[in-house]
């Protein structure tokens, strides 16, 4: 009988060296850890294995590896834990799943009466509760060869972006009807601890102090306590010291403007204006056939273009197309999508590159069409309202004069709501009378929650002289930075990242839940002197990590800031994350639904004839 005992891999892994860039980011670190744990155990027996996943681990694996990567490691089939499967008694099964009752019950059913597989190798994304562990032990002990908790319950969405994969968190945290706020914060804290464990970081924790809501403070306390327990003892019986990292937790109300504004950088613009679901962009080819492309980091051109302004993207794509065609024959610089297809047939070696360019020619064109038809007219007003001044730097004295043309033009209801919100945010709230008029203007009397429910996030909608938190944060002076006229707004999170790295955050507004090591001094001079020659490409980051977590969703412009600040401060890598990714539409719908009551449970009774 195989001895079944807990094994946690979080504290015994070989440290994954810090990395940056698309090919050296979170995805690579996660895949390396999976290889060092799950795959390493599989290699010990040279037998092909089946891998069985739940929905979360399916998403996790699909983000950091391909089926061919698994095949290369001896995994021959990947199956869904909850679907009916044929027994394969001669094969061993690798179960990679979340430690939930639903997953454990599904696992037990595979072995309880008649085993479906020769043996089971079980890996949980996080700590498995004692009752579930005991239940599994009672029914399946003799079939389990390995059982480990690998501390990885987050999704590595991009090189420097992670999510907790749970959009429902928004309602659980901010809805006045919420009955699971405490449990949701506990779960988020557990997921953040697994992120830190995967990065082998024990960060100092800070949060944004808020006079109305204390969710960021509660989460900071939970994370700090759970990190202390996780790192209590290492293999040598010594307590792990804090590493050169900071984790800063902020509430969504920290910046209500950025997720609402029309952004003109490629990624943010595409996800706002084009119906992209699960990163899949659907478009019609020239021959009329339906095509689908995934916008992720396996598309090198997407990684190059995603953070550029749309004006630069439309300039760049023809140049990149020209580069490809130049490898075959000289060209006059004019090339159509049809011409690209001809190149694909003639040059198999360039097929993938040409396909990417075709996708981005079409996507950039789609974005520009949307921009020219409606968004361009909105952008100047939005920027003036958000920034509080016009292109010449003159203060906007009468924001209503800026807003009115938007309300009088035939823009969509959602676009008008966005403009009204920017107007209200700029004033830190308006009067009841004015709010009623605005709601009537936009014709959303039946759905005024799009606007009024922002109060649940602690954002002032009705002005109040006693509303302490309505003080606007002072912004960094960026008057010398080159900006497009219709892209003058800079997400507030970028100020936070730069201030944190330069050690300029005021501890009265940004209290420490736990102190960072004294070496976190902004300049990273100490680190740079100690280790000025990187030993390899993977280890070229010599400084520290700043991890920023936004409670209630992160938008694409904020994701971009993590890369921009990392690029400008080579000694500090910035990683940003949240419960989920926001688009303006998903945020507005989430806000509207905060006051809705949870659906009443009901039973469907089948009528008998």
Image (tube, rainbow, N blue to C red):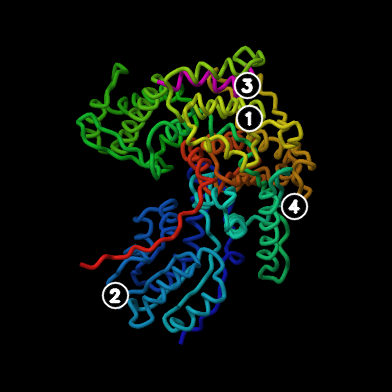
Badge 4 crowding class, 10 Å Cα cut-off, few under 14, some 14 to 19, many 20 or more, is many
What is the tally of numbered marks visible in this picture?
A: 4
Front residue of this view, candidates 436 and 281:
436
Give the mark nearer the N terminus: 2 vs 3.
2
Please give left or right for residue 367 compared with residue 261 in the image: left
Between circles 3 and 1, the one closer to the viewer is 1
Look at the image and tell me in which quarter the C terminus lies: bottom left
Q: Where does the image place residue 246, in percent across and percent down from the top left?
A: 69, 48
Q: Are marks 1 and 2 in contact (CB under 8 Å)?
A: no
Q: Which mark is residue 87?
A: 2
Q: Where does the image place residue 144, in percent across and percent down from the top left?
A: 44, 78
Residue 443 painted magenta: no
Between circles 4 and 1, the one closer to the viewer is 1
Q: Which mark is residue 432?
A: 1
Residue 381 painted magenta: yes
Residue 513 against residue 108 in the figure, above or below: above
* Residue positioned 25% across, 34% down in the render: 344
Magenta: main secondary structure equals helix
Give the mark nearer the N terminus: 4 vs 1.
1
* Residue positioned 76% across, 46% down in the render: 511
Give the mark nearer the N terminus: 3 vs 1.
1
Give the mark nearer the N terminus: 1 vs 2.
2
Q: Are marks 2 and 4 in contact (CB under 8 Å)?
A: no
* The residue stretch that appears in magenta: 374-389
Between circles 2 and 3, the one closer to the viewer is 2
Q: Which residue is mark 4?
A: 513
Q: CA distance from mark 3 to mark 1?
A: 38 Å
Badge 2 crowding class, 10 Å Cα cut-off, few under 14, some 14 to 19, many 20 or more, is few
Q: Which residue is mark 3?
A: 481
């Amino acid at each position: 009988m195989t001895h079944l005992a807990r094994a946690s891999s979080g504290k015994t892994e070989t440290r994954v060296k810090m990395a940056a860039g698309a090919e050296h980011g979170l995805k690579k670190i996660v895949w390396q850890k999976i290889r060092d744990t799950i795959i390493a155990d599989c290699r010990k027996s040279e037998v092909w294995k089946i891998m069985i996943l739940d929905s979360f681990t399916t998403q996790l694996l699909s983000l950091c590896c391909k089926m061919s990567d698994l095949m290369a490691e001896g995994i021959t089939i990947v199956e869904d834990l909850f679907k009916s499967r044929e027994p394969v008694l001669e094969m061993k099964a690798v179960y990679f799943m979340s430690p939930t009752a639903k997953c454990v019950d599904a696992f037990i059913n595979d072995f309880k009466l008649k085993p479906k597989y020769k043996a089971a190798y079980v890996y949980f994304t996080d700590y498995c509760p004692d009752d579930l562990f005991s239940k599994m032990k009672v029914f399946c002990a003799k079939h389990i060869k390995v059982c480990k908790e690998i501390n990885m319950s987050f999704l590595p969405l991009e090189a420097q972006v992670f999510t907790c994969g749970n959009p429902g968190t928004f309602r659980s945290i901010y809805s006045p009807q919420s009955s699971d706020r405490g449990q949701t914060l506990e779960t988020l804290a557990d997921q953040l601890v697994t992120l830190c464990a995967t990065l082998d970081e024990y960060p100092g924790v800070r949060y944004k102090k808020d006079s109305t809501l204390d969710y960021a403070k509660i989460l900071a306390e939970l994370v700090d306590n759970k990190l202390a327990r996780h790192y209590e003892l290492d293999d040598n019986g010594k307590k792990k010291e804090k590493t050169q990292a900071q984790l800063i937790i902020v509430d969504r109300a920290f910046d209500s403007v950025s997720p609402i504004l029309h952004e003109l950088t490629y990624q943010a613009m595409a996800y706002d204006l084009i119906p992209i679901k699960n990163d899949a962009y659907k478009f019609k080819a020239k021959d009329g056939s339906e095509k689908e492309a995934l916008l992720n980091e396996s598309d090198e051109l997407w990684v190059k273009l995603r953070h550029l302004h749309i004006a630069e993207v439309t300039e760049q794509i023809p140049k990149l197309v020209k580069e490809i065609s130049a490898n075959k024959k000289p060209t006059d610089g004019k090339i159509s999508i049809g011409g690209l297809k001809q190149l694909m047939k003639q040059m198999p070696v360039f097929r993938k590159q040409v396909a990417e360019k075709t996708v981005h020619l079409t996507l950039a064109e789609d974005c520009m069409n949307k921009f020219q038809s409606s968004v361009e007219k909105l952008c100047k007003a939005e920027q003036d309202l958000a920034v509080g001044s016009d292109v010449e730097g003159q203060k906007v004295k009468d924001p209503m004069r800026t807003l009115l043309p938007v309300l009088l033009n035939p823009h969509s209801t959602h676009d008008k709501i966005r403009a009204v919100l920017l107007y209200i945010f700029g004033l830190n709230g308006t009067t009841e009378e004015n709010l009623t008029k605005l709601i009537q203007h936009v014709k959303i009397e039946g759905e005024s929650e799009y606007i009024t429910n922002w109060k649940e996030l602690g954002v002032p909608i009705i002005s109040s002289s006693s509303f302490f938190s309505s003080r606007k944060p002072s912004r960094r002076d960026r008057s010398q930075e080159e900006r497009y006229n219709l892209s003058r707004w800079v997400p507030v999170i970028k100020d936070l990242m730069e201030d944190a790295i330069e050690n300029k955050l005021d501890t009265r507004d940004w209290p420490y839940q736990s102190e960072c090591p004294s070496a976190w001094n902004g300049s990273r001079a100490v680190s740079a002197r100690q280790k000025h020659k990187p030993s390899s490409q993977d280890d070229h980051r010599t400084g520290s990590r700043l991890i920023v977590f936004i409670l209630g969703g992160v938008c694409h412009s904020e994701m971009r800031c993590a890369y921009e600040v990392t690029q400008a401060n080579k000694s500090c890598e910035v990683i940003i994350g949240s419960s989920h990714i926001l688009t303006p539409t998903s945020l507005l719908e989430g806000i509207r639904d905060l006051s809705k009551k949870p659906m009443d449970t009901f039973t469907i009774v089948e009528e008998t004839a």
